[in-house]
Image (spheres, rainbow, N blue to C red):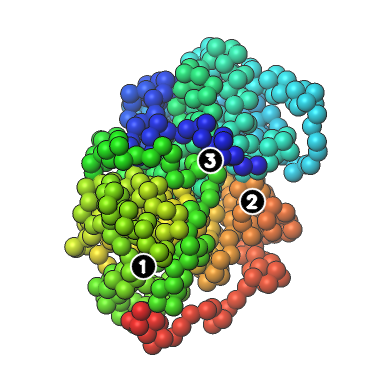
């Protein structure tokens, strides 16, 4: 199910896609920390310790708070485990720490009721709070559907009333990977289904005059996540001014290392850039304290207002944005043949370098890049530099008989995202666009490469997820090999070009049934050469099968020390001892014809690789 053009025109996800305006929301208090309203974008994280180990949880929460974490979440799988939340909260208070505590609830309403006695906020997942997910296919009549809603209301109302009585906040947190069978059968595995799932619970809360809640629409696929949040905002605005609830942003199962940071920046940063989002959590398969600086970098420019660039004059702004914000469609262009390659016209997004970057790549650097090699030089591509505000330069390009590759001129005083959106709106669709991460090329190595990586991921990722861009050029990284590698990694993180194995890996928490960090690294080492294969590594079953919707293979904790292996959403091997599970995963990949040895990988020898670039 997709949004029609008429619907897309009627709904708006932000007032103006060419200027930053933070979405105005009501204030929701979580303990003594306010979300939304005039408050800054808040940074959250989640404990990885077992909830039953009170001392470990208190220690980890104190470390997070010291690192700048403003809200801490902890899982509560059962009512008995939820009973540990009281001592954890007291331990924090005894240590002089007032960081709010949030209980993460899946499947167990009785655990939520127990948790609400002790914590400042309860997170519920509409997909599994009162529903069971069996991937069951059935048709619901309107009467049957109404009956299901009545059942859900009976299960959810006690928690609403308790939270209202105690002043406890709530997050109605939909996950793409755990939509109920009922929602799936009526709306499909779509952003619309995610939104409807959350609104059902919100309507119940509002019936009891309870408004201390926030929404989330999390997914492991940034394009799905972005579309879901945008659609939610549009639907809330359509419901009325008093539906102005704050939003919690996050990309689930983002993974670890650079991949996890890029994917999180693409999803979270794209929404923040449009003024959407009031609190964020970066989900990394690492120790939770490492999530905080990444989240702080993401939030900083929007909290400080230091976004840079001049505003685009009102007379230059088109009536409609050059993309459907609710339904990803790549901007249509015509093919351009450049140096033996084709750009645009539905071809894969190309990686471009400047000549000086190309000349800085020696054979050893090319070998390290593997198949992720530069494809064109900017100087020999025939690209046209323009100011999208200038009628004359835009008119000259549009008057060309042939489709052209076009980009923004360097040193323009424009922010990257609105600048390229304006260019896409004013160019005739036949012309292709070369995206740049910055309009000010770096002259020397960045002192903080992580900040550069995140900012490039926000800018390029946002545009790519809008469907804009036929080629990319990294200018904010002065090291040639790092610039090329970053370009490919952002393309992969945005889900527009896969040149290596892609991983969906959840962060650890108290539900996790094996060591996620070491296991993820072991799987990476064994499978990292499989170009285009997507592998999900999930610590438990909560989001497992659903979040693996786009994955080819899954490695999921089924019980302590036991692993279940999946092909897509289907479990095919059960209760494999953990020490044998990676080998069994490799055998499963081989059985489905997706395995290659490192010697079989496509790629040129050093001399051929050097010739490929220097001969452009």
Decide if residue 64 is in sight here.
Answer: no
Comparing labels 2 and 1, the label whose residue is closer to the camera = 1
Which quadrant: the C terminus?
Answer: bottom left
x 53%, y 15%: residue: 210
Can residue 91 be seen here? The reply is yes
Neighbours of disc 3 within 10 Å: few (<14), some (14-19), many (20+): many
Looking at the rendered structure, which numbered label has been put on residue 419?
none
Residue 282: percent from left, percent from top:
43, 44
**Coordinates of residue 329 in the picture (x, y in percent):** 53, 50
Residue at the image point whose x is 64% and y is 60% from the top = 553
Image position of 586 with respect to 62: above or below: below
Give percent across and percent down for residue 41: 36, 33
Sooner in the amino-acid sequence: mark 2 or mark 1: 1
Q: Residues within 10 Å of mark 1 (few under 14, many from 20)?
A: many
Front residue (pair 130, 582): 130
Q: Nearer the viewer, residue 223 or 401?
A: 401
Q: Secondary structure at mark 3?
A: loop
- Residue mark closest to the camera, 3 vs 2: 3
Q: From the viewer's perspective, is residue 340 above or below residue 28?
A: below
**Residue holding disc 1:** 352
Q: Is residue 312 left or right of residue 559?
A: left
- The kind of secondary structure element at disc 1 is strand
Question: What label sits on residue 549 in the rendered view?
Answer: 2
Q: Residue at x 33, y 69 (%)?
A: 382
Foreground pick, 205 / 469: 469
How far apart are the two marked residues, 3 and 2, measured between alpha carbons? 19 Å
Question: Badge 3 is on which residue?
Answer: 326
Farthest left residue in view: 443
How many numbered discs sit on the rendered protein? 3
**Mark 3 or mark 2, which has the lower sequence index?**
3
Pointer 3 or 1: first along the chain: 3
Q: Report the Cα–Cα distance between label 2 and label 1.
A: 32 Å
């Amino acid at each position: 199910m997709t949004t029609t053009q008429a619907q897309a025109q009627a709904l708006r996800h932000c007032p103006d896609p060419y200027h930053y305006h933070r979405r105005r929301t009501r204030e929701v208090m979580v303990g003594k920390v306010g979300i939304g309203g005039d408050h800054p974008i808040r940074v959250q994280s989640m404990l990885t310790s077992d909830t039953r180990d009170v001392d470990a949880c208190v220690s980890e929460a104190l470390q997070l708070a010291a690192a700048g974490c403003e809200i801490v979440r902890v899982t509560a799988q059962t009512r008995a485990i939820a009973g540990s939340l009281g001592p954890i909260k007291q331990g924090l208070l005894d240590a002089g720490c007032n960081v709010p505590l949030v209980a993460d609830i899946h499947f167990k309403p009785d655990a939520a009721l127990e948790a609400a006695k002790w914590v400042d906020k309860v997170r519920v997942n509409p997909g599994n709070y009162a529903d069971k997910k069996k991937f069951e296919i059935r048709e619901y009549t309107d009467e049957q559907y109404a009956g299901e809603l009545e059942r859900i209301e009976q299960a959810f109302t006690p928690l609403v009333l308790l939270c209202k009585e105690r002043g406890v906040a709530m997050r109605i947190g939909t996950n793409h990977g755990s939509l109920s069978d009922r929602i799936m059968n009526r709306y499909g595995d779509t952003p619309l289904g995610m939104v409807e799932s959350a609104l059902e619970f919100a309507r119940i809360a509002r019936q009891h005059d309870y408004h201390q809640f926030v929404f989330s629409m999390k997914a492991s696929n940034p394009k799905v996540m972005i579309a879901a949040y945008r659609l939610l905002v549009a639907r809330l605005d359509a419901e009325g001014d008093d539906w102005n609830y704050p939003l919690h942003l996050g990309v689930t199962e983002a993974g670890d290392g650079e991949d996890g940071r890029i994917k999180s920046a693409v999803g979270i940063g794209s929404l923040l850039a449009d003024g959407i989002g009031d609190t964020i959590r970066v989900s990394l398969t690492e120790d939770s304290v490492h999530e905080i600086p990444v989240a702080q970098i993401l939030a900083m420019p929007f909290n400080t207002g230091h976004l840079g660039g001049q505003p685009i004059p009102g007379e230059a702004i088109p009536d409609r944005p050059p993309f459907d914000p609710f339904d990803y469609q790549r901007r249509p262009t015509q093919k351009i043949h450049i140096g033996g390659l084709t750009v645009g016209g539905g071809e894969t997004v190309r990686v471009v370098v400047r000549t000086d970057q190309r000349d800085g790549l020696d054979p050893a650097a090319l070998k390290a890049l593997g198949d992720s090699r530069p494809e064109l030089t900017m100087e020999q591509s025939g690209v046209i530099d323009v100011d999208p505000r200038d009628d004359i330069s835009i008119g000259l390009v549009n008057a060309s008989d042939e489709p052209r590759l076009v980009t923004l001129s360097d040193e323009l005083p424009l922010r990257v995202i609105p600048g390229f959106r304006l260019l896409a709106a004013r160019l005739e669709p036949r012309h292709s666009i070369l995206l740049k991460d910055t309009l000010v090329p770096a002259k020397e190595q960045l002192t903080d490469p992580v900040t550069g990586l995140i900012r490039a991921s926000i800018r390029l990722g946002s545009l790519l997820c809008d469907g804009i861009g036929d080629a990319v050029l990294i200018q904010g990284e002065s090291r040639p090999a790092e610039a090329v590698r970053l370009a490919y990694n952002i393309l992969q993180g945005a889900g527009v070009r896969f040149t290596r194995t892609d991983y969906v890996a959840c962060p650890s928490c108290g539900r996790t049934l094996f060591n996620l960090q070491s296991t993820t690294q072991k799987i990476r080492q064994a499978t990292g050469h499989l170009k285009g294969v997507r592998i999900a590594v999930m610590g438990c079953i909560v989001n497992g099968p659903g979040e693996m919707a786009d994955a080819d293979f899954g490695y999921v904790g089924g019980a302590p020390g036991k692993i279940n292996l999946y092909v897509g959403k289907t479990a095919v091997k059960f209760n494999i001892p953990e020490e044998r599970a990676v080998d069994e995963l490799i055998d499963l990949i081989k059985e489905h014809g997706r395995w290659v040895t490192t010697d079989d990988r496509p790629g040129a020898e050093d001399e051929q690789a050097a010739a490929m670039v220097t001969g452009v």
